[in-house]
């Protein structure tokens, strides 16, 4: 298991310790979880399960263009 040394100002260190304590975690475990969250490369399973769950009620580009009006003329430069 690797070890990392970081330097924090006193204010940030205090906030980190409070956050770890409120999560009932050691500072080391709290930091490790933050790093893991920030470096994840996969979608959460809840999001993956949503794929294909929407109905096909979105109009096609052709349907959108049927209802479009004429563009206004542009000003000459």
Image (cartoon, rainbow, N blue to C red):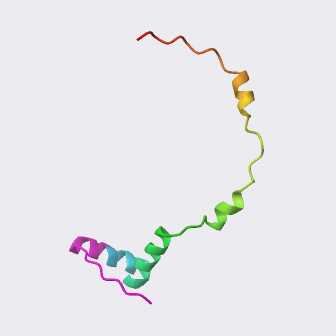
Quadrant position of the N terminus in the picture: bottom left
Q: Residue at (49%, 12%) from the top-left corner?
A: 74
Quadrant position of the C terminus in the picture: top left
Give the magenta-colored segment's residue range.
Answer: 1-15
Residue that lies at the very extreme toward the left in this rendered image: 10
x, y percentage for residue 11?
23, 71
Please determine whether, in this image, residue 71 is positioned above or below residue 2. Answer: above
Please tell me in which quadrant of the rendered image residue 70 appears: top right
The total number of labels drawn is 0
Residue that lies at the very extreme toward the bottom in this rendered image: 1
Please determine whether, in this image, residue 49 is positioned above or below residue 58. Answer: below
Residue 4 lies within the magenta run: yes
24 and 44: which one is in front?
Answer: 44
Q: Residue at (70%, 58%) from the top-left corner?
A: 50
6 and 33: which one is in front?
Answer: 6
Q: Residue at (73%, 34%) from the top-left corner?
A: 59
Left or right: where 48 falls relative to 21: right
Please determine whether, in this image, residue 50 is positioned above or below residue 75. Answer: below
x, y percentage for residue 56?
78, 43
x, y percentage for residue 65?
70, 24
Residue that lies at the very extreme toward the front in this rendered image: 77
Most common secondary structure along the magenta stretch: loop
Q: Residue at (66%, 67%) from the top-left corner?
A: 45
Left or right: where 54 falls relative to 74: right
x, y percentage for residue 10?
21, 74
Residue 3 lies within the magenta run: yes
């Amino acid at each position: 298991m690797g070890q990392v040394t970081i330097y924090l100002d006193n204010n940030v260190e205090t906030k980190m310790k409070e956050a770890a304590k409120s999560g009932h975690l050691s500072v080391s475990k709290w930091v490790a979880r933050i790093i893991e969250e920030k470096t994840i490369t996969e979608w959460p399973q809840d999001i993956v399960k949503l794929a294909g769950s929407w109905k096909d009620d979105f109009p096609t580009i052709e349907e959108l263009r049927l209802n479009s009006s004429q563009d206004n003329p542009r000003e000459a430069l």
